[in-house]
Amino acid sequence: MPALIEAKNVTKIFGGGLLDKSRTVALKDFSFQIDSDNPSVTSIVGESGSGKTTLARMLLGLAAPTEGEVLYNGKNLEKLGGSDRRQFLRDVQVIFQDPFEVYNPFYRIDHVLETPIKNFKLADTEKGRRDLMIESLEAVGIRPEEILGRFPHELSGGQRQRIMVARALLLRPKLIIADEPVSMVDASLRATILGSLLRLNREFGISLIYITHDLTTAFQVSEDIMVLYRGSLAEAGDVDQVVRHPEHPYTRLLVGSIPLPDPDLPWEGERAIGRPAGELGVQGDEYCQFHDRCPYAMPMCVQTHPPLFHTHPNRVTSCYLYRESPELPMPQMTSIFKSSNREGPPEETEQLDALDAELEVSQENSSTPTSADD
Ligand SMILES: Nc1ncnc2c1ncn2[C@@H]1O[C@H](COP(=O)(O)OP(=O)(O)O)[C@@H](O)[C@H]1O
Ligand code: SF4
Ligand SMILES: [Mg+2]
């Protein structure tokens, strides 16, 4: 069966030719796929400007790749027509960073939920529409009577974002792409929103691509992780292994700068010391993107882009420090993911229980009690 969504050697370049100063390679030769029959939770992590949103927009068909292609059920997304396009618009939903932009301030909240029901003819009657809205809101832990009939500005950022989750659920998609969904809300609400997204994966079998600059929440929700740096994949694989024992010097840097989930863990976080630009004599545009910040950079790092080295069964790292390991071609990258190698759904409740526990702690610590519906 073809993958639900597949990016095949996708490159996205903004700006003009090689000499154009504004030219940006936002994503370079990236391949990745999401199966339709095995619901997964995959994080894409990287600092601002690493190409995360560009990738999301290409997977959503909102931007066309400069090279390579994005396939939906084996068909090129740019050439989808008629019923395939309509099915794609149901199967793949998105949640963006700032839900306020999605709301029209002059319409009640109901409108944002009614629109997909009407567009996709999910119910014929007024009562049918209302029942669907209520069911979806309750599935993400919102009491419908508290929000229906109200205007966007009357709700908190956390409520607005959870209504977006309910809206995505209405269409029973196969995949939700959430681009920084919790970076505009308080820390105390993060666990609530992430918990409702994770429930969609566990209870409704919806795959999730969680995009974030925050390694801690990626660790909390996902099974597999891809770390991007300046448009290139630095490291990918089992989130537990990548976060606890990062290999790529950039991931080590990221891990070294996050609050530790467990203070007893033997983290070896370190800060990159950087190198003067040009010290290694970069020629051409084939080099490791991290060479100018990497404390281990070697001449080979600026001669060719490091391939993916298959360092462990569930991991790959694009770094010459691991050149003793066999290479894995980029298009096969997702084959090492845990989600590609397990039978049945992901681990049942462990991560959800951890998020619930965090929610309780944040509520206890909060001087102004936070409603779970917030
Ligand atoms: N529409 C655009 N025009 C020009 N450059 C862009 C555009 N969108 C993104 N970029 C550039 O592409 C790179 C990746 O951006 P983006 O995908 O938004 O990264 P992220 O989401 O990881 O912060 C950045 O250098 C950004 O400036
Ligand atoms: S390939 Fe070289 S420059 Fe890049 S991260 Fe590895 S050691 Fe550092
Ligand atoms: Mg972004």
Image: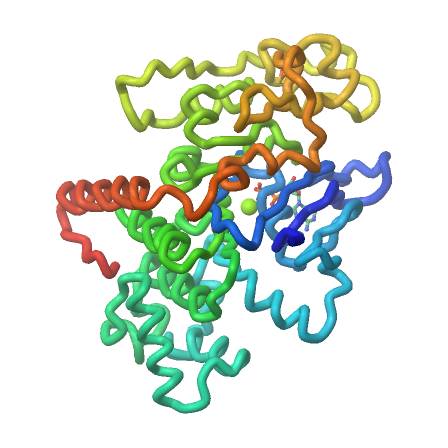
Q: Position of residue 68 (x, y in %)?
A: 78, 46
Q: Position of residue 148 (x, y in %)?
A: 30, 77
Q: Position of residue 47 (x, y in %)?
A: 53, 34
The image quarter in which residue 222 lies: top left
Q: Nearer the viewer, residue 173 or 367?
A: 173
Residue at 54% in and 80% down: 119
The image quarter in which residue 235 lies: top right
Give the tally of numbered discs.
0
Residue at 78% in and 47% down: 66
Figure quadrant of the C terminus: bottom left
Say if 106 sits above or below 8 in the image.
below
Residue at 27% in and 40% down: 354
Residue at 35% in and 88% down: 127
Whether residue 139 is visible here, answered yes or no, is yes
Q: Nearer the viewer, residue 163 or 345?
A: 345
Q: Is residue 65 left or right of residue 176?
A: right
Whether residue 187 is visible here, answered yes or no, is no
Q: Is residue 144 left or right of residue 160?
A: left
Q: Position of residue 153 (x, y in %)?
A: 34, 68
Figure quadrant of the N terminus: bottom right
